[in-house]
Image (cartoon, helix red, strand yellow):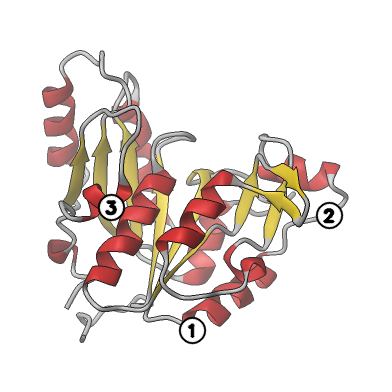
Amino acid sequence: MTLHPSPFTLHGLFVTGTDTAVGKTLMTCALLHAYAARGLHVVGMKPVAAGAQWHADGLRNDDVEQILEAGNVAAPRELVNPYCFEPAIAPHIAARIAGTEIDLLHLERAYAALGAMADMVVVEGAGGFCVPLNAREDTADLAQRLRLPVLLVVGMRLGCLNHALLTAQAIHARGLKLAGWVANHIDPQMMQAEDNVAALSERLGAPPVARIAFSPCPDPRAIATSLDIDQSGYFG
């Protein structure tokens, strides 16, 4: 399968969101299923996970478990999720409590190792696009170092227009391509949802990849079948 030419790394995609809990993991898994259905060897990556439980074999984060299950490449857990912290708090604070520091070079090397194993690596960021990862760097710095096109998941609720447009500006300011966006209806009571989707379509300047109806238990496999990723230029 030949991917379209681009100045950006073609074997990766960076998934970010307008906030935490807007459906980034759902979309990461849906993308993995969609790429796998095209015959690609795919793997997901959650560079930093905050919010985990202790098990007999160590800390386990639910998002990471879903991503591991959705890929079709048997990659080492330490590459898929290099940093995992117990408290569900800002990553740089969780790292400080754990007595460590998130090293972007380490994350870059883990991504490169995954890229050597797969045709496509889908990387899920932490929280929103500019969440701090250490005292000096944030998630936007990580996306910039990986030089990946970005997919923006918009949690459709009051305030999402401002959050989405500011995030798009931040992506462009880092010299990165906004490859597409997703409208995820996380608030079933949102007023004028259609008008909000229309406003984003007019202003984001990137193709809509999916519109996900509200569901208490969304299925990434089902969503994968409805993704319109071709127009974003990352399928050949």
Mark 3 or 1: the one toward you: 3
| Residue 144, percent from left and from top | 49, 64
What residue is pinned by disc 1? 117
Q: Which residue is pictured at 37% across the width and 81% down the height? A: 119
x and y percent of residue 16 in the render?
A: 42, 49
Give the alpha-carbon distance from disc 1 to disc 2, as whole Å: 28 Å
**Quadrant that contains the N terminus:** bottom left
For residue 102, the mark is none
In three-dimensional space, the C-alpha distance between marks 3 and 2, rounded to whole angstroms, equals: 36 Å
Residue 160 x, y percent position in the rendering: 32, 28
- Real-space Cα separation, disc 3 to disc 1, in angstroms: 23 Å
Q: On screen, 162 above or below 141? A: above
Mark 2 residue element: loop
Q: Which residue is mark 3?
A: 221
The kind of secondary structure element at disc 3 is helix
Q: Quadrant of residue 229?
A: bottom left
Q: Are marks 3 and 2 in contact (CB under 8 Å)?
A: no
- Residue that label 2 marks: 100
